[in-house]
Amino acid sequence: MTADTGPTVDHTLGTPYGVYLLMEASTPQVEGDMARLFSVRLDNSVPRCLQFFYHMRAKTPTGMGSIKVIQYWNSDYNYELWEDHSTYGDQWVEAMVDLPNNVTQDDMFVIRIQAYVGSSAYADIAIDDINLMLGVCPYVPTAPPDCAYYCDPSNPSTSVCIPAASVCDFNIDCPVDGIDEINCEY
Ligand SMILES: [Ca+2]
Ligand SMILES: [Ca+2]
């Protein structure tokens, strides 16, 4: 495990002893490498909802990879249903993805959850508590604010983080020294 990326606790138990799936972004992984998780074959008779929790914490403002959910019917019909390439700091984020049925003539489909390595070695992606439910998703989870910019970049594990859009936006967001509004070429 690399410091300043990845989860400190799992989602299920909220302790360091819980388990989760982790895609390491460090060497020998290179940008664009992919980790893929397959579902069992699911029948086409009913709509379903895929719920899972994911963790995208990067040490640096850029370099996070991405995570995608793909509904694979066959080589001609496979659809990217959901994608995220944000970074949220050390917290688990809920995803709810509707899995439509009757999209093709196929009797069965497979769900692939694919995580891609970004350009930074400090950008691990983890997932936990994957749950398949019958019916459409009961709600749309609210994503937390993006955590792309560290107010104290030399201490990313303890730093306040703010969305990239809050840098040089004329409002001081970083406590103490307002570093997010320094070195802006206003
Ligand atoms: Ca777990
Ligand atoms: Ca600001």
Image (tube, grey):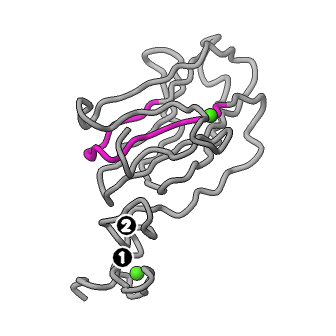
Q: Is residue 131 left or right of residue 148?
A: right
Q: Nearer the viewer, residue 159 or 113?
A: 159
Q: In which quarter of the image is ligand 1?
A: top right
Q: What span is in magenta?
A: 114-130
Q: In which quarter of the image is the C terminus?
A: bottom left
* Nearer to us: label 1 or label 2: 2
Disc 1 Cβ-to-ligand 2 distance below 8 Å: yes
Residue 67 locus on image (x, y percent): 45, 39
Marks 1 and 2, how far apart in space?
8 Å
The amino acid beneath tag 2 is: Tyr
Classify residue 10 as left or right of residue 65: right
Tell me where residue 108 sits by quadrant: top right
Q: Mark 1 points at which residue?
A: 167
Q: Check residue 149 in the rendering and tell me which mark sits there, or answer none.
A: 2
Label 1–label 2 contact, CB within 8 A: yes
Q: Where residue 152 sits in the image (x, y, percent)?
A: 35, 71
Residue 20's label in the rendered image is: none
